[in-house]
């Protein structure tokens, strides 16, 4: 095989996908519990997304950054507030890169704080603030001036802040996704807010996975009462097509000048079209996502199994932490017609379509009882 396989991909070929289901070329039907890693907010092949994107594709597919697509401003409005500025990129990693560039241009040689177990992407810049040593350290030396503190440790946060008075910004993922659906603790967030305000740090929040209504609010940081200066978004944003964005607030809106950043592809016109459809729908669904998220969480808590350590999460970003790894869990689930995403070897991460119904949740939980 010439394709370099760096992923442990499923052993079947997808024929088509619709809603929460993926159908393989042999006619098998699978329940998709992670929707393209939290990308397909309205599920696979949502008819309105398909129609809107196809209509635009028939007119044009790509224009480059020499042209301003008429949908750019509308999508920027949907993900930001009055007075903010938005720049579009192609992925979450690129959003992290741009956020780091904004920060570095603003703070010069100041340091940037980040947290263990946080994921911000795999480019060299993003790896510099990536809290997964296993995927980071073999690429060292990375960017200088990055300080790692332990996630959810008030003591380590205080210590790193006092040892590094030149920290000027923080990169924060309030609800860690790849880190195992792990929310920041109340006490930790309060201390981070206090230190950030006291030192006038720039607060950059990574909302690539938890943002854009995954947790029922537009951004997950809103659950934590954080004031953000920079927000990164991607995944849900393009309605299934690659699109990322960096939202800059206040002083941050004045940092970048023409020539400071760019991309041939971004924002792709089709991704913008998908974004508009998806975001206009999602902004009316906050209450319903919160309600179905609560319903799903409670159903997961009802699963009686001595293998489960904890069930947690916010909105429709939920996880089951197992006491220990269950060998071949993914294969067992597949045999039951369920596609599971396991992170950190023992956290089953659920990032379902945000329009998943209660009866689909019931069906899934029934299958999970059998699998776990
Ligand atoms: N930030 C977070 C929180 C993520 O979960 C991810 C990807 O999973 C990224 C950044 C990187 O995004 P992408 O894979 O689109 O480059």
Image (cartoon, grey):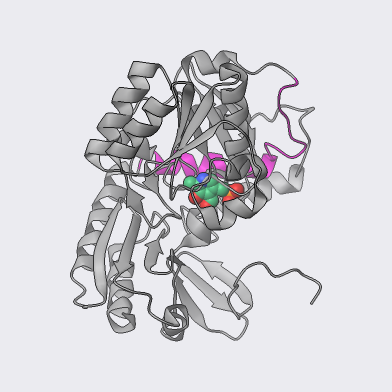
Q: Is residue 43 left or right of residue 2?
A: left
**Between 174 and 74, the one nearer to me in the picture:** 174
Most distant residue in the front direction: 163
Rendered location of residue 143, percent (x, y) = 63, 36
Residue shown at 33% from the left, 58% from the top: 318
Q: Position of residue 280 (x, y in %)?
A: 46, 39
Residue found 47% across the figure and 24% down from its top: 167
Residue 98 rendering spot, x and y as whole percentages:
62, 32
100 and 351: which is toward the camera: 100
Quadrant in which the C terminus is drawn = bottom left
First to last magenta residue range: 259-284
Hey, which quadrant is residue 326 in on the image?
Answer: bottom left
Task: Residue 295 in the image: state x and y as whole percent.
Answer: 22, 59
**Nearer the observer, 144 or 316:** 144
Residue 269: in magenta span:
yes
- Quadrant containing the N terminus is bottom right
Q: Is residue 335 above or below residue 307?
A: below
Q: Is residue 338 visible?
A: yes
Q: Is residue 283 above or below residue 236?
A: above
Q: Nearer the viewer, residue 242 or 49?
A: 242
Seen at 48% across and 48% down, the residue is: 131
Placement of 102 over or under 329, stated as above or below: above
Would residue 50 be seen by someone viewing this image from the given angle?
no
103 lies above or below 224: above
The question of residue 117 being in magenta is answered with no
Residue at the location (48% across, 70% down)?
Answer: 21
Q: How many marks?
A: 0
């Amino acid at each position: 095989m010439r394709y370099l396989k760096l992923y442990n991909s499923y052993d079947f070929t997808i024929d088509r996908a619709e809603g929460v289901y993926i159908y393989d070329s042999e006619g098998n039907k699978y329940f998709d519990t992670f929707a393209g890693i939290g990308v397909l907010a309205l599920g696979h092949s949502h008819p309105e997304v398909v129609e809107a994107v196809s209509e635009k594709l028939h007119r044009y597919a790509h224009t480059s950054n020499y042209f301003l697509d008429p949908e750019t401003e509308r999508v920027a409005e949907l993900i930001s507030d009055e007075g903010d500025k938005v720049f579009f990129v192609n992925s979450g990693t690129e959003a992290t890169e741009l956020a780091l560039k904004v920060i570095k241009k603003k703070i010069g040689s100041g340091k940037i704080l980040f947290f263990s177990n946080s994921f911000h992407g795999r480019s060299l810049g993003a790896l510099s603030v990536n809290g997964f040593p296993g995927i980071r350290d073999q690429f060292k030396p990375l960017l200088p001036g990055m300080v790692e503190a332990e996630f959810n440790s008030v003591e380590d946060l205080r210590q790193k802040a006092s040892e590094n008075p030149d920290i000027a910004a923080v990169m924060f993922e309030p609800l860690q996704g790849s880190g195992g659906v792990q929310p920041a603790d109340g006490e930790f967030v309060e201390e981070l807010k206090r230190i950030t305000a006291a030192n006038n740090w720039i607060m950059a929040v990574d909302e690539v996975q938890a943002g854009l209504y995954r947790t029922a609010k537009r951004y997950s940081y809103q659950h934590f009462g954080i004031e953000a200066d920079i927000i990164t978004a991607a995944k849900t944003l393009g309605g299934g097509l690659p699109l990322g964005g960096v939202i800059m607030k206040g002083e941050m809106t004045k940092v970048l000048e023409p020539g400071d950043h760019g991309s041939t592809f971004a924002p792709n016109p089709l991704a913008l079209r998908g974004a508009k459809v998806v975001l206009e729908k999602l902004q009316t669904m906050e209450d319903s996502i919160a309600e179905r998220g609560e319903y799903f969480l409670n159903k997961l808590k009802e699963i009686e199994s001595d293998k489960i350590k904890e069930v947690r999460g916010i909105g429709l970003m939920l996880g089951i932490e197992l006491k220990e790894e269950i060998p071949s869990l993914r294969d067992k689930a597949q045999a039951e017609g369920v596609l599971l995403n396991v992170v950190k070897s023992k956290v089953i991460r659920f990032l379902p379509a945000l329009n998943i119904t209660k009866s689909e949740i019931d069906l899934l939980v029934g299958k999970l009882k059998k699998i776990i």
